[in-house]
């Protein structure tokens, strides 16, 4: 299988799919990652000149995390952080279409459309547009993943609500997911924050117990052709 994972920000790919990326890569599948926004720049204390090195280091962490998980490639599109809703949807869609044309994936993973974070919502909408099922499209399946500290923090108040029906057993790759998240030094938080190592393990254990395995990641099936 060849898959494309689309994330709004550096670290979303690990939070939502880190265990699944590692599992699929270890099985010999080809996994590519496209991160749309640059990260960090929306923070109130960010200065473009002073913090240019910090931003470069953040992007280097995305590359390192992808390598740890076994991804075949990691690309950053450089859209403005937390401002993707100010862009024409067509601009975001075309960037995703470009990657799909270049990679020809059968499976696409993207954000859930009911997230609290608006960049996630734009990513979801743009992905669905870019993966519309034409006769020439290589994409046969689109799955939406949750992101701790965004999906659950919408408290099911936004549509669509997250109703997972697909689960990947990450019992053997949960540790790798947590290791990859710890590469993002500026994004991890102490427990009980959802992005803490303890919370990430707890979430995986919860989904695992739901489906009868030790640890799992949950996805909503947007569409699937078998």
Image: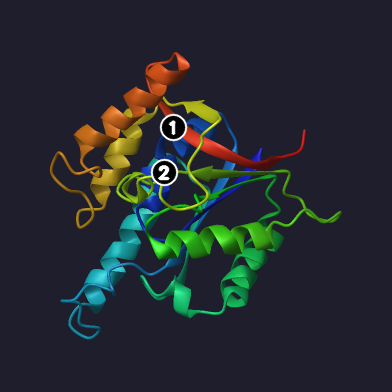
Query: How many circles with numbers are drawn on the protein?
Result: 2
Q: Nearer the viewer, residue 162 or 43?
A: 162
Q: Is residue 61 left or right of residue 27?
A: left
Check the picture and name the quadrant holding the N terminus.
top right
Task: Name the residue furthest bottom.
Answer: 49
Tell me the residue at 56%/79% (across/down): 88
Callouts 1 and 2 close, C-beta under 8 Å: yes
Residue 90 x/y as whole percent: 63, 75
Question: In the figure, 134 relative to 28: above or below?
Answer: below
Mark 1 closeness class: few <14, some 14–19, many ≥20 residues within 10 Å:
many
State the SS at label 1.
strand
Tell me the residue at 59%/42% (across/down): 30
**Which residue matches tag 2?**
16
Question: Does residue 184 appear anywhere in the picture?
Answer: yes
Tell me the residue at 22%/72% (across/down): 43
Question: In the figure, 129 relative to 43: above or below?
Answer: above
Residue 120 x/y as whole percent: 45, 59
Residue 79 x/y as whole percent: 45, 74
- Precedes in sequence: disc 1 or disc 2: 2
Question: In the figure, 168 relative to 56: above or below?
Answer: above
Tell me the residue at 28%/35% (across/down): 200
**Which residue matches tag 1?**
217
Mark 2 closeness class: few <14, some 14–19, many ≥20 residues within 10 Å:
many
Q: Is residue 148 left or right of residue 190?
A: right
Label 1 vs label 2: CA separation? Answer: 8 Å
């Amino acid at each position: 299988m060849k898959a494309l994972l689309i994330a709004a920000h550096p670290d979303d790919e690990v939070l939502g799919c880190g265990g699944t990326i590692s599992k699929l890569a270890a099985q010999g599948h080809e996994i590519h990652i496209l991160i749309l926004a640059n990260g960090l720049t929306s923070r109130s204390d960010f200065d473009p000149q002073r913090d240019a090195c910090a931003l470069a280091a953040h992007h280097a962490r995305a590359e390192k995390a992808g390598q740890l998980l076994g991804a075949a490639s990691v690309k950053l599109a450089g859209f403005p952080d937390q401002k993707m809703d100010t862009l024409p949807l067509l601009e975001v869609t075309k960037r995703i279409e470009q990657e799909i044309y270049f990679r020809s994936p059968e499976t696409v993973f993207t954000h859930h459309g009911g997230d609290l974070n608006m960049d996630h919502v734009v990513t979801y909408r743009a992905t669905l547009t870019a993966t519309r099922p034409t006769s020439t499209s290589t994409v046969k399946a689109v799955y939406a993943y949750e992101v701790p500290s965004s999906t659950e923090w919408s408290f099911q108040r936004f549509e669509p609500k997250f109703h997972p029906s697909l689960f990947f057993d990450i019992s053997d790759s949960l540790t790798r997911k947590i290791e990859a998240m710890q590469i993002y030094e500026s994004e991890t938080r102490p427990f009980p924050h959802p992005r803490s190592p303890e919370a990430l393990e707890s979430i995986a254990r919860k989904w695992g117990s739901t489906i009868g395995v030790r640890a799992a990641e949950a996805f909503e099936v947007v569409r699937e052709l078998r």
